[in-house]
Image: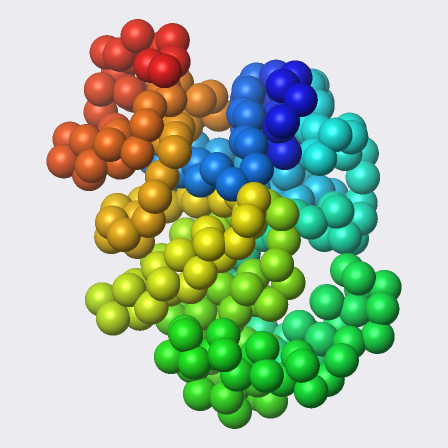
């Protein structure tokens, strides 16, 4: 494992309900890098995100996950969040009884272990919601309850900006967004990229969100395996030609870089 790795996934195999989904995944993300994962529906992209975050439904049957210099393969989700991993969900849940702002405040408190300075937090919330074109009163509404699909996705990006993780995994944060919202969310991600050493793992089907973002590596995940790794330009190529050549094994499965 390289000394500078932030996330180092080694030969990771994962089963869900005894069904093998991921089959020997290797992934190395260094601080400040942006990696993109693309692949057909059902390839295992969300499974990879959930497994890195430590969702107990996903059983690691082989390999390990290192984060920030330690083995987290068996660590709880809470601990991983404290360590600095953030996952934005493909389908964010609606939670009654806690406001978006309250949820963020609790999450910051959990992460830092210190009382949250309310005035400073409100100010930061205001700035980030402004950046994401969100009305401030959404902070007082129940988390995601009645939010439109696009508003839920923006709320996820807001949480990322407020929590300031070391690694943010964004699972199809762009799906269901209108053209303006894609641009806005992209601005939010760019804001996160400005943070020193903030790393990103972006799972997406669309290339729109990536147009204005710097991408270091693109991985193609097919049937539980990373079959190809290229640079940022691979995104455009996939956009034009699709996944067929990867599914049909027409490319050398060795990494291109
Ligand atoms: N909790 C679960 N229970 C049963 N099967 C699951 C579960 N989670 C994932 N799977 C199965 O694992 C496979 C991979 O699913 P996953 O959600 O990781 O795919 P994906 O690459 O994210 O697809 P998409 O592009 O459609 O979001 C699918 O066949 C799915 O049905
Ligand atoms: Mg998915």
Residue sitting at the far left: 240
* Horizontal relation, residue 61 to residue 187: left or right: right
30 lies above or below 143: above
Colouring of the image: rainbow
Residue 161 sits in which quadrant? bottom right
Which of the pair 256/227 is nearer the observer?
Answer: 256
Is residue 72 visible in the rendered structure shown here?
yes
Q: Is residue 45 above or below residue 220?
A: below
The quadrant the C terminus occupies is: top left
How many numbered tags mark residues here?
0
Residue 130: image location, x then y, percent: 43, 80
Q: Residue at x 38, y 33 (%)?
A: 216
Q: Where is residue 84 in the image (x, y as percent from the top left)?
A: 69, 49
Q: Position of residue 141 (x, y in %)?
A: 58, 88
Residue at x 63% of width, y 34% of height: 6
254 relative to 113, above or below: above
Q: Which residue is drawn at 58% across and 77% down?
A: 124
Residue 39 shows in this picture: no
Picture coordinates of residue 171, whole percent (x, y) = 47, 50
Q: Quadrant of residue 242?
A: top left
Q: Residue at x 60, y 89 (%)?
A: 140
Query: Is the N terminus in the top left, top right, bottom left or bottom right quadrant?
Result: top right
242 relative position to 185: left or right: left
* Residue 113 quadrant: bottom right
């Amino acid at each position: 494992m390289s000394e500078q790795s932030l996330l180092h996934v080694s030969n990771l195999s994962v089963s869900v309900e005894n069904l093998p989904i991921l089959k020997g995944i290797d992934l190395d993300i260094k601080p400040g890098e942006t990696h993109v994962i693309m692949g057909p529906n059902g390839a295992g992209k969300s499974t990879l995100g959930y497994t890195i975050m430590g969702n107990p439904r996903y059983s690691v049957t082989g390999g390990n996950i290192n984060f920030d210099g330690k083995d987290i393969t068996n660590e709880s989700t809470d601990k991983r969040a404290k360590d600095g991993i953030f996952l934005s969900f493909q389908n964010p849940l609606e939670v009654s009884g806690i406001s978006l702002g309250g949820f963020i405040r609790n999450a910051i408190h959990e992460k830092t272990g210190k009382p949250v300075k309310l005035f400073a937090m409100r100010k930061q919330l205001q700035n980030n919601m402004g950046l994401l074109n969100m009305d401030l009163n959404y902070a007082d509404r129940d988390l995601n309850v009645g939010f439109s699909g696009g508003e839920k996705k923006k709320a996820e990006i807001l949480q990322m900006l407020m929590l300031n993780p070391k690694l943010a995994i964004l699972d199809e944060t762009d799906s269901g967004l209108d053209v303006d919202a894609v641009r806005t969310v992209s601005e939010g991600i760019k804001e996160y990229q400005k943070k020193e050493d903030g790393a990103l793992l972006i799972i997406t089907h669309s290339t729109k969100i990536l147009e204005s973002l710097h991408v270091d590596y693109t991985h193609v995940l097919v049937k539980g395996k990373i079959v190809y790794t290229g640079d940022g330009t691979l995104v455009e190529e996939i956009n034009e030609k699709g996944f067929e050549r990867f599914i049909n094994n027409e490319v050398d499965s060795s990494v291109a870089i």
